[in-house]
Amino acid sequence: MAVRLFLSSASKRFSDQIYRLTGLKPRRLAIYREALRHSSVNSSEKSDKTLSDNERLEFLGDAILDAVVAEMLFMRYPLKQEGFLTEMRMRVVNREQMSYLANRLGLVQMMDLKPELLKHPSAVKSIAGNAMEAIIGAVYLDHGYKKAKIFITQRLIGQYLDLEKLMSTTISYKAVLLKWVQQQKKTVSWNHITEIHGRKDLHVVSVLIDNQIVASDKNLSRKKAEELCCEKACRILQIQD
């Protein structure tokens, strides 16, 4: 009986933490536990192999985040064109911003992960950003798209990010990628093809690291296509400036 009371108390504390974090009363605590469980724990011999880490929820949360931010920017800037909206979305959802939001919410302190990782700031930054996306995925599964949208736009972006400041900030993902390639002693190259898009040319660009395609994107501007491609590559490779 004592054990049951302890578990109930622990679950209540965790539920309260999630409520303070999201502003929503959690209905399925297991989803949030999964969102805060790093893959390093599953690699431990003593870990419970029946529990999942947060990588699948991170994948889901990333997609929900992209959709919500795209809609928010579309409605907020009705006179802006596709290029502006795409760049602004990249600035909002990039790994740097996700890590920043996670730190403001204290996600790392709530996570189940190997303590040794806390000694490496770059690893913690990446882990925090991934956990932020996983929490978004958990909110979506627990409460649906509408509540997830409110959580992202009001509790995260509305409370912690200044869109006007982000709009005036210049980020070159190509420069970030090139710096990383040099540090890692790898090679980088681009493939470029041109497709006919109505009366205009559509530029399709792929970036290759050590001759392996990492990311591709397209745009009416070749320069913009390269930048979009590099931004994708930075996210896939978890490169931070």
Image (cartoon, rainbow, N blue to C red):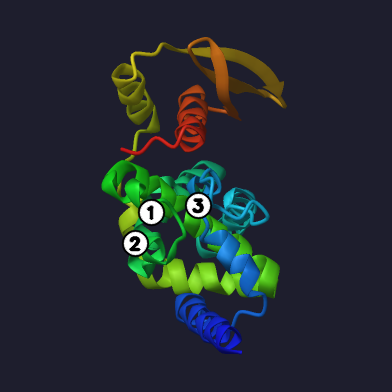
**Residue at left 34%, top 19%?**
184
Which residue is at the far front? 1
Please provide percent x and percent y for residue 221.
Answer: 52, 27
Observer-nearest of 22 and 11: 11
Q: Amino acid at mark 3?
A: His
Please provide percent x and percent y for residue 174.
Answer: 38, 27
Please provide percent x and percent y for residue 145.
Answer: 68, 68
Residue named by callout 2: 103
- Dot 1 or dot 3: first in sequence order is 3
Label 1 element class? helix
- Dot 2 or dot 3: first in sequence order is 3
User: Where the C terminus falls, by quadrant?
Assistant: top left
Q: Is residue 115 found left or right of 73 in the rendered image?
A: left
Observer-nearest of 183 and 1: 1
**Residue at left 51%, top 81%?**
10
Residue named by callout 3: 38
**Residue count near mark 1 (Cα–Cα under 10 Å), binned few <14, some 14–19, many ≥20:** many
Q: Nearer the viewer, mark 1 or mark 3?
A: 3
Q: Amino acid at mark 1?
A: Ser
**Residue count near mark 3 (Cα–Cα under 10 Å), binned few <14, some 14–19, many ≥20:** many
Label disc, if present, on residue 99 of the rendered structure: 1
Label 3 element class? loop
Label 2 element class? helix
Vertical placement of residue 165 versus 87, above or below: below
